[in-house]
Amino acid sequence: MPDVTTPYGPNSPQNPPPTGLDPLASPSTGSPSSGGPPQQQWAATPPPPPEPPKKKGGKLRWVVAVVGLLVLVGMINGGKDEPADTTAAAAPAAAAPASAAPAQAEAVPAAEENADGYGKKTASFGEEVNAGGMIVTAQAPKELSQPYLGTQACATVTLRNEADSQKSFSPFDWKFRTKDGVEVTANIPFNADKALNTGQLTPGGKVSGQVCADTQTTGVTTVVYNPGFGIMHEITFQ
């Protein structure tokens, strides 16, 4: 082995190493040759730093600002509409007194409510009531007795046709009610000569007769005109 202290060794200036090789590196590994002085290793040049990320908050701030502005405008408009809502809510309250009208209408007599002659009515004995063109009245019932036959409560009734067409009449259009709430259909009176018969009334015609309860019905207080099962008319005389 040559003396490394002499300038004539294998790595002396007279015998420089090949280009690109560390003069002290091993031919195979590139590490310093044994016996040579340590050499400084040169680090590779670091890559350039990455570019800073672009800021994306700019568009988001604009979106938030626009949404906030729309909300503010909506709140302002909503505040302006509140007085109108209050006024509209007050309108039904102001109209409330009109609901008292039905109560006042109830105070009107039944005969005036049904001037057209239809529906249920209440009248006093002897009062004339229009029942669809048939003017009807009933007198207060009286108890009539016959020997061996008993006692009947009878009422004299009158019907007058003021319509433009014929009207039928019958004793079975009448009923009686007692103070106990019993209701019975009229019966044939003992005195048949005074009984109301069945027939037709021409326009302008008039008929009168008696209608009576049966002998078992006592305490009659009310006479009811109820033609056609009360579908169109029902007049209570009391």
Image (cartoon, rainbow, N blue to C red):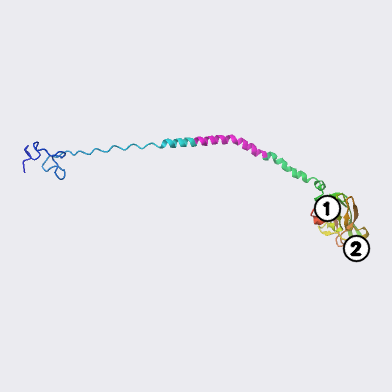
For marks 1 and 2, give the CA distance: 26 Å
96 vs 201, nearest the viewer: 201
214 vs 174, nearest the viewer: 174
Q: Which residue is mark 2?
A: 150
- x then y, percent, for residue 95: 70, 40
- x then y, percent, for residue 12: 9, 37
Q: Main secondary structure of the magenta part?
A: helix
Circle 1 crowding by C-alpha within 10 Å: few under 14, some 14–19, many from 20: many
Q: Which numbered circle lies on residue 236? A: 1
Q: Which numbered circle lies on residue 180? A: none
Identify the image quadrant of the N terminus.
Answer: top left
Q: Is residue 85 magenta?
A: yes
Label 1, secondary structure: give it. Answer: strand
The part of the chain drawn in magenta is 68-91
- x then y, percent, for residue 166: 86, 53
Q: Residue at x 52, y 35 (%)?
A: 72
Label 2, secondary structure: give it. Answer: strand
Instruction: Indicate the amino acid at tag 2.
Output: Gly
Compared across the picture, whether 192 is left or right of 90 comes to right
Residue 96 seen in the figure: yes
Compared across the picture, whether 185 is left or right of 35 comes to right
Q: Nearer the viewer, mark 1 or mark 2?
A: 1
Q: How many marks?
A: 2
